[in-house]
Structure formats: C-alpha cells, structure tokens
Image (cartoon, rainbow, N blue to C red):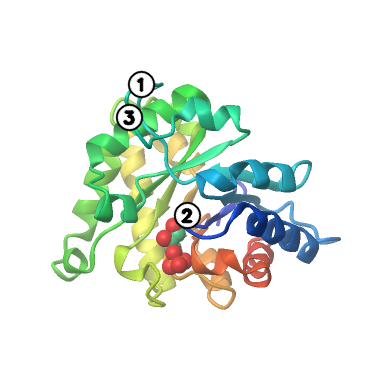
Amino acid sequence: MNKAVRKAIIAGNWKMNKTPAEATQLIGEILAANEGKDVSGCEVIACVPYVDIDAAVKAAAGSFIKIGAENCHWAKSGAFTGEISADMLVACGVEYVIIGHSERRQYFGETDLTVNQRVKAALEAGLKVILCVGELLEQREQGITAEIIAMQTKIDLLDITAEQMANIIIAYEPVWAIGTGKTATADQAEEVCAHIRATLATLYGEAVAEATTIQYGGSMNAKNAAELLGKTNVDGGLIGGAALKAADFSAIISAAQA
Ligand code: 13P
C-alpha cells in the first residue's frame, strides 16, 4: 500500500452466499468485532448478492461499511429477463459494484467487451466500480500473464476517461488463486499490480496511475493479508471465503490499518 497517494480498500465478495437474515447477522458481527477499533486506515466494502442488498444497507447504515453489488447489466432498462440495472442498484443504496469477476467470465460468458459495457453503465449511474482482471493458470504457465492482464485492462477500460478513473478500483485476481487456498506470493501479486499500474500510466498518465487503488484477490486471509498489503502496489484486497467470517474479515481490516 502507498497510502500517501491512494486509498486502501478492503472489500468482501460474498458471491452466492447468505440469505438476507444471514447478511444482517454477518454485518452485525463485523461491526461488533470492530467496535472501538480505529478502522479509518482503509475503506471497507461488502459486496453482497442482489437479494441481500436491502438488509445489508440497513445493517450497515451509519457505519464504516459500504455496500456493493456483484454485477450489473449494461442497459438502463428493458427486456433483459433476470438482469439488474445500475440505476436499480443506486436506488437501493448501493455505492460499489464488482464488474468482470472471473466467475462471471468463466461461467456466464462474460467477455472484455461486455465487461467494458457494464463498466460504462455503472459509472454513468454513479456507482464506483471494482473491475476484476486476472490470468488463468495455463496463461501464467505459458508466460503470457503480462500480455493478458494488459489486454484485459485496456479493453475493459475502453472509452473510460481519466476523470472517470477516480471511480474505478482494479482488482487483480489470478484465477488459479481463487477459492483454491493457493495464494499468489506477495512478490507475484506486487509484480502484476505494478504491471497494471504501468498499463494505466500508458493509458492515462502517471498521476492517474499512481492514484488508482489496485487490490489483490485470491485466497487472501487473516494470515497472509499483512504480507500482501505490505507491498507498495497492493492497495487492498477483494476477499471471498474469508469475508464470510466476521473474525477473519476483521483481521484483514486490521492488517490494512498499518
Ligand atoms: P477467495 O478469497 O475465496 O479465494 O475468492 C477471491 C475472490 O474471488 C474475490 O472476488
């Protein structure tokens, strides 16, 4: 992290977990676990399933936890059965949205072009975007991680302006590290996060690149968070499994206070 120039952000991605009642409980537990602690050293977000948004917004009201969604559609409204628009999320009190998570790319046919459309729609609606990029294991083994990451970053951010970058967070999530217990080493995370920043510099210049928060995601947990967050270009975490346990998520929040 380099807090002198950019915000540290710890975000939970709950994926397809928790009912509304369970969401209320988990947020309550996270707040209780942090009571009396100084958590001002990072921003904290819980990205929750659509049906949990109302409960999560109410449970987090007035607290340090901000609420995000896990996806949104690119159209403002229309015949898109089963989809949710960015405007709908804003109307429900959502401030952030994850776009382009590898599980959307892997299981739901998401491409860099649809990711780009969703990013634009989310920004237009006034949401802040957590844009996910990451390489597959085969791509890392083939030695093309840098190319893949640069390509995803460039296509996903097509037509996004330097001003709009103030509302974009990038999450580097190596697909092979998600839910596998296999974390990228701190050096691997740093190398790719630095590469994303260098790519942003070519697109938007040094100032925007330096000001952009770049998170690491992929089996981040209470034990490895401090080492990962200790790297200059790792400005936070996007946390799956460990975000579902109040004690673990709180330990990661504490690690980000340094
Ligand atoms: P895990 O922390 O469970 O590996 O998930 C990471 C992730 O995909 C966050 O978006």
SS for callout 1? loop
Front-most of residues 231 and 117:
117
In which quadrant is the N terminus drawn? bottom right
Residue 65: mark in rendering = none
Q: Quadrant of ligand 1?
A: bottom left
Within-10-Å neighbours for mark 3: few <14, some 14–19, many 20+ = few
The residue under label 1 is which amino acid type?
Answer: Gly
Residue placed under numbered mark 2 in the picture = 215
Q: Which mark is residue 80?
A: 3
**146 and 84: which one is in front?**
84
Q: Assign a secondary structure to mark 3.
A: loop
Q: Label 3 near label 1: C-beta < 8 Å? A: yes
Return the disc, 2 or 1, that comes first in the chain's sequence: 1
Q: Which mark is residue 78?
A: 1
Q: Residue at x 25, y 55 (%)?
A: 106
**Residue at 39% over, 64% down:** 189
Q: Residue at x 86, y 61 (%)?
A: 36
Front-lying residue, 226 or 178: 178
